[in-house]
Image (cartoon, helix red, strand yellow):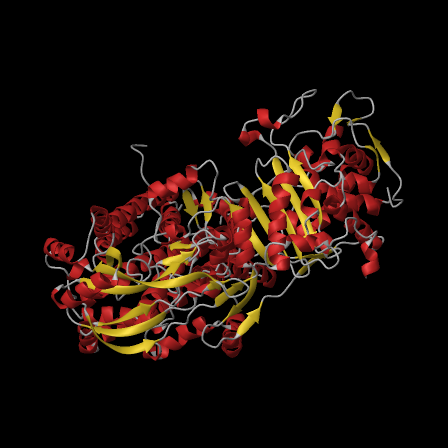
Amino acid sequence: MLNIPLKDYLRETRIFNARLGVAGVIVVVLTFILLARLVYLQVIDYRHYATLSQANRVKPVPIPPARGLILDRNGVVLAQNFPVYTLEIVPEQVKNMRGLLDELGKLVRVTDGDLKVFQKQLRERPRFEYMTLRSYLNEEEAARVAVRLPFLNGAELRARLQRHYPFGGLAVHALGYVSRISEQDLDRIDKSAYRGMQHIGKLGIEATYEELLFGRVGFEKVETNAHGRALRTLERIAPTAGKNLYLNIDAKAQAVAEQALGKRRGAVVAIEPATGAVLAFASTPTYDANAFVNGIEPAAYKALLEDPDKPLINRVINGQYAPGSTIKAFLGFADLEAGNSIDMNRSVFCAGSYNLPGSAHQFRDWKKGGHGAVTLHDAIVQSCDVYFYRLAVALGPERMKNFLAPFGFGRATGVDLPAESSGLLPSPEWKKSRGQPWYPGDTVVAGIGQGSVLVTPMQLASGMAAIASRGLRMKPTMLKAYEDPRTKERVEAPATLIQEISTKDRRNWDLLFTHLMGVVHEAHGTATGIGRTSPYHIAGKTGTAQVKAVAQGARYDEHATPERFRDHALFVAFAPVEDPKVAVAVIVENGSHGSTTAAPIARQVLDQLILGGPADARKAAAVPPTPPKSVEDEE
Amino acid sequence: MGPIRWRVDKPLLYALLLLAALSLVVLYSASAKDVNVTISHFVRLLLGFAVLIGVAQVRPELLERVAPWVFGVGLFLLVAVLGAGAISKGAQRWLGLGPLRFQPSEIMKLGLPLALAWYLSRGGLPPSWLRIGVALVATVAPALMIAKQPDHGTALLVAASGLFVLFLAGLPKRLIAIALIAVAAATPILWGHMHDYQRNRILTLFDADADPLGTGYHTIQSMIALGSGGFYGKGWLNSSQAHLEYLPESSTDFIFAVFGEEFGLIGILLAIALYGFIAGRSLLIAFYAQDSFSRLLAGGLALGFFVQFFVNIGMVAGILPVVGVPLPMMSYGGTSILTLMAGFGMLMSIQTHRKIVEF
């Protein structure tokens, strides 16, 4: 202020003071308007509002909407609502709590646990709220309470709709569940939209499509007496029920997948290649979603959390595994595209191991002694490691990544479920960013799907579906359609193309089909066990992913290895080869062999989805033992 | 030299202390005698007064120097919050800093008047057209970002605080007239672009009974609370509107309705006198201030405080639409008490660091 001329200072003072004066006048005027309004409300209109306050026994009571059902593609109900009676108490209206509790205890069974939970609510929540004393009253108990209700001031019998999953654990990882609204939920939802609601979708479909399933809360203007008991309903704004969701899942195939996995830890995903529709979504072990609906008991939750089989993990989209030899299906395409073996007869000699030039480190083939001279076709059919070691080195890590990325690896597939993992498609750059150098050996093992590469079962199935549709990778979608329960108006979920995988020569797809079909239908194929009896043609690839590194010079001995360290078994496939309807990925943790553990599971799921049930053994014999030369003739 | 002299403005401090004491009394009742809520509010008040005393010791020259930085940091955090919100695909107002959750929009409540007072005073008053243009952009940009969070209440307060500084700096009368005409002309267009719920909030002002369970519910219940309080009030802890759960958000945005119901017009006159005194004292500090930066800052803060309590009480009394503006000092929750007190600290700093004796 001191370094400006006095004339300017005075001018500024004048301007500011004039403006401050205007502001001051406005402030005074507005304050008087406010006061006038308050005088009007509190003095002139006092009688009016005092009456309203007295008569404010008219209370809007929220009416919860019925949550939308979840059904499978054929209309099998996977999640529904059940009416349950609860006995609730409004403490403010109770004169003698002990007396009331005694009386209620005579009418219905109230356990010490119930009482404890009730006392906790009594301590922590405002006294004018409804507090639950007992849930799940049966008809008889409800009737007994209802008759005595006029003499039980403060007690209330309420019917609530409760979520119920009729199949318990079936597809639980896909469906998710609803549970009590938590503090964190309150932070992100519109509280007024959830007035009177106690439940919200937490995981899976229940969470993704919460908005569709939820509907809209209705209100009832209820006149109450001095004790707050409802006398009559004055006005009612009906709630809007949530939409019914039809999933792409086929409940029968889902059950077949889960039964086939049995007690093992693993995952099965089946996708319709043309649309991306997810037909089966199994992650085992499962758990009973119903246990979560009313808040799971701490002990039961702890048991689930500490279960070494980790049932709570959604293995389909959050299980990240080394793809093992299943990656060869995709690298086979890279090989064809790169032009290394368009000549089907060009072969590589496999002597059972591979050395990088100038290095003594041996990268072994799974087959002791090797496969001899192998073409790409042989290498895929017999799963020759040495061929793919060489291919990986020839392509180099960057090109290998560029060939694999279009199939969706290293990125979430975008399936309509929350919190999908992205897997990992490593590159020298990625490793450098973590402060580690990329060794030539990293390239070699990447050729057989080992090293740091990680995929989710969903990515494997989606990638396989992209092969099956000859390069059109569709977004995997759980939702098939939703329907307004009242108007029956139905909206189909759109199929979304994520990527069209470019190819130099469309015949490369046909060649790849032939190679993958050989895996299942040729005598030397690694999955010939499921091909012999199949009435339709399957194209597939087995895989075995190491869990524990095997030392140089040592051999992996399955029986000497504890179960938890045994290899993961994988199998990816699509069928029928001539007109692919289903792509499937199977992972069995510590299942040892893709061919004997994973492939038969995939076959059962394919049979269910393609044939509608287990294959007839006689029909299988009708299939020619050798497949046609190339499927391109079919087009 | 003598003992250390704390630089505080006693009239302002006493009024604030009185208001703080009143807020605890009201909140205890409004929160249905929730001791935890009351204690938590008490702690916030303590922190607030510590901030107030601390800021009051800072020389205005230092405030002037950090002004653009406060604005810059605020703007950066706002962008960060918008970005984080975009990633989590949900509304986001908070930035987590360890156990603290902080609302960057709160920084802007101080950052914008600070920055504008600094920027406009540097060029001399009245400001050039260029400076007016820059100041308008600096006002509108953060306000829009806050509105997008969406937090329309705070966006309104921030925009208002910027416009006040501009007005006090001598915004040309012609421009003010044009702006008023433009606003009047744009109202129908704005109306067309509003969400249904925003339109309803405004329509509710004219006829609260049109939608008694929906948009009008808040307003009707708070008017019943105020009106039934009458001249003398129903007495402390006797707000049936709040305790029977008719009045929503009774301990946050609508706490004034509980106060009015329990303490009547007498209590309200006292409260408004207190708020009015604080606003008046703040304006007086602006008047006494001796350089343009201090004047603009003090004036902007004083008017900002006034608007905050005017909008809140106006909303509770049913003459302004329901926007989420808390009542300063009284409403429970959030970090707004800290920014509010920091603002009063600045006012005290301006008042107690003057170089020339009073006129």
A204 relative to A477 in the view: left or right: left
Viewer-nearest residue: A27 or A624: A624
Q: How many marks?
A: 0
Viewer-nearest residue: A140 or B219: A140
- Pinpoint residue B43: horizontal percent, then vertical percent: 29, 44
* A560 in relation to A486, above or below: above
Question: In the picture, residue A570 is in which quadrant?
Answer: top right
- Pinpoint residue A492: horizontal percent, then vertical percent: 58, 69
A62 relative to A210 in the view: left or right: left
- Pinpoint residue B259: horizontal percent, then vertical percent: 23, 62
* A442 in relation to B226, above or below: above
Q: Is residue A456 visible?
A: no
Viewer-nearest residue: A388 or A635: A635
Determine the residue located farthest toward the front in the rendered image: A618
- Residue placed at 52% from the left, 49% from the top? A258
* A397 in relation to B290, above or below: above
Question: In the picture, residue A31 is in which quadrant?
Answer: bottom left
Quarter holding the C terminus of chain A is bottom right
Q: Is residue A139 visible?
A: yes
* A127 in relation to B311, above or below: above
- Pinpoint residue A201: horizontal percent, then vertical percent: 44, 57
- Residue placed at 83% from the left, 46% from the top? A336
